[in-house]
Amino acid sequence: MLDRTPQDAFRWPPAPSVAGAAIVPRPSGGGAAGSGGRILGWRDHVLDIERTWLGLERPSWADMIREAGWRRDAAASYCGRCGRTAGGEETLDPCDAPAGEAGCRSCRGRTLAWDRVVRLGEHDGLLRDTVLEVKFSRARGLGHEVGRALGVAIAECIERVRVAMPEIVVVPMPPSRWRRFVRGIDHASVVATGVASELGVGVERWLRRAHRPAQSTLSEASRRRNVAGAMQPTRFGRRRLMDGSAARLVLVVDDVMTTGSTMEEACRRLASVRAGAGEVWACVATAAGPS
């Protein structure tokens, strides 16, 4: 029989072969503890396998932010009424000006389907890459972190209008059932869950959506025709909307707003059923830059 030292014993996952590195045994068994004394579960072991054999390692969004030197937009850097980048142009916040005078040159005096836009930044750079990864790589954890950051921006605006948190409802932009099946993720709901978690309020699905061609493949005029009539209130949403005390503030959450056609359709459908006073805000991770 061969003599075997503890270092020769089989271990899973294998330790990295670094010259001169000491081999530290990994705790084993169902009661194995991770860093900080946390009990390791089956997800931890799957992640170990992915990292060791497949080299899959996604940096946290906090690391991505530090590396890119990114900061979310200050409220004064974009129009709080339509969401467009100010670009040096004076904009009047809806909290500080009458309805007919609020906004920027492109939206002032226009009738919009929502009362305010809250965004993290333009659809460019880190934010663009992030929302694409959430949508097409099913990065739910990343989407949740984006939602929490958006929730912080929303909370700052809520402080100005002084709405109580229990009177707020987060409504995610709905995907069609087919697109949800094909992509394997309801990305807007993931972001909305992060927003609700940061604000300490609930997520309610008030809308459903018929399948239509993807908006990203169409022109601005075609996008409006494509989404017209595509959304309807759910049975639960209709009941809640017809209750005038349901919420004083409805936050419709999506990942991207470019032309605003999809958001406009969603907010109009809510307004067509809703009873009583209140506001609807369009809350997005990214929005288009100057037109």
Image: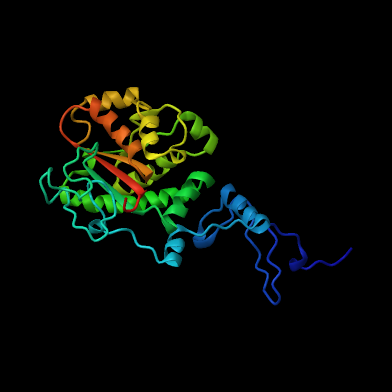
List the single residue furthest toward the right: 1
The residue depicted at 18 percent of the width and 30 percent of the height is: 245
Q: Looking at the picture, tell me which residue is in the foreground, 93 or 153.
A: 93
In the displayed structure, does residue 169 sit left or right of residue 144?
left
Vertical position of residue 179 compared to residue 74: above or below: above
Is residue 172 visible in this depiction of the protein?
no
The residue depicted at 40 percent of the width and 67 percent of the height is: 69
Q: Quadrant of the N terminus?
A: bottom right
Q: Position of residue 28 (x, y in %)?
A: 64, 56
Q: Looking at the picture, tell me which residue is in the foreground, 86 or 18.
A: 86
The residue depicted at 36 percent of the width and 45 percent of the height is: 258
Is residue 6 visible in this depiction of the protein?
yes
Q: Position of residue 34 (x, y in %)?
A: 55, 59
Vertical position of residue 214 compared to residue 123: above or below: above
Q: Looking at the picture, tell me which residue is in the foreground, 2 or 102.
A: 102
Q: Position of residue 68 (x, y in %)?
A: 44, 65
The residue depicted at 49 percent of the width and 62 percent of the height is: 36
In the displayed structure, does residue 163 sit left or right of residue 270?
left
